[in-house]
Amino acid sequence: MSDPSGRLVHKHRVEALNDGIYAVAMTLLVLELHLPEGFTHADDAEFAQALAHLAPKFIAWLLSFFILAVFWMGHQRAFHFVHRVDNGLLWINVTGLLFASLMPFSSALIGEHAGHFATHVFYDANMAALALVALWQLDHIRHHPELCEHPVPAGVVAGVRLRCWALVVLALVAVAVATWNPRIATLPFMLMLLLGRLARRVEARAAAKDALQTERPSP
């Protein structure tokens, strides 16, 4: 594709930036998992108690790590169909990286102060923002076919939308749960495991339907 204006960016440069920031963000998450100083000579009971106190941080790390992994994989799948990146898609991607890079702070906040409602609002808003930017990116790609070598399959679109809107809804549910009991407000996000399987089934059915229509001889 020719680009006399020079405003298009090769997708590999964007993918490299994404890989680097996601890798750093996912690594920084684990830095919050450490025992307090002074437990070098603790007995078994004190050591077990210290590990138990890490449970909220461990849950926040595990959840945040897999959420970031899901969005990284989603970005890779979307860019599989992208050939060039225009200025709009570039800034959408940068906005997504903004919220991805915020996840280590959000995770540390909720791991350290899980009993406070405000920390859950902040964390859940970070989750919802990642999902909304992913939807924004998908719509931009679909409405700018000149950026793609091949159109994004309907099944992929349906799967991404299901995952992202489900995460937005779960973030709202988590805020509602936090008003009642902040200590268990991260539990709704566990449903992403089931919703991920549902999204894969939606994609598989759509792919099978497309393959059947392709193989069917024209009249």
Image: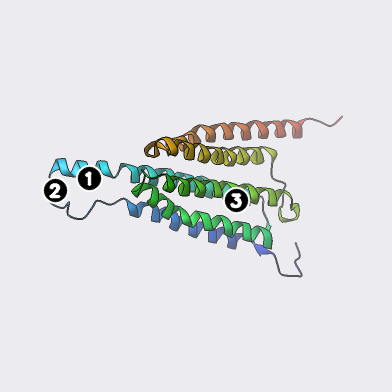
Q: Which residue is mark 3?
A: 133
Q: Amino acid at mark 2?
A: Ala
Crowdedness of circle 2 by 10 Å Cα count: few (<14), some, many (20+)? few
Q: Which residue is mark 2?
A: 42
- In terms of sequence position, does the residue under pointer 3 or pointer 1 come before the other? 1
Q: Is residue 57 left or right of residue 155?
A: left
Which residue occupies 47% across, 38% down?
174
Q: Is residue 42 left or right of residue 65?
A: left
What kind of element bears circle 2? loop
Q: Which mark is residue 50?
A: 1
Crowdedness of circle 3 by 10 Å Cα count: few (<14), some, many (20+)? some
Q: Evaluate whether residue 80 shows in this view.
A: no
State the CA–CA distance, disc 3 to disc 1: 38 Å
Q: Amino acid at mark 1?
A: Ala
Residue 176 location, x and y as percent?
Answer: 48, 37
Q: Amino acid at mark 3?
A: Val
**Contact flag, marks 2 and 1 (Cβ < 8 Å):** yes
Which residue occupies 66% across, 57% down?
89
**Contact flag, marks 3 and 2 (Cβ < 8 Å):** no
Residue 47 location, x and y as percent?
Answer: 18, 44
Residue 84 location, x and y as percent?
Answer: 68, 59
> Which quarter shows the N terminus?
bottom right
Q: Which mark is residue 168?
A: none
Crowdedness of circle 1 by 10 Å Cα count: few (<14), some, many (20+)? some
State the CA–CA distance, disc 2 to disc 1: 10 Å
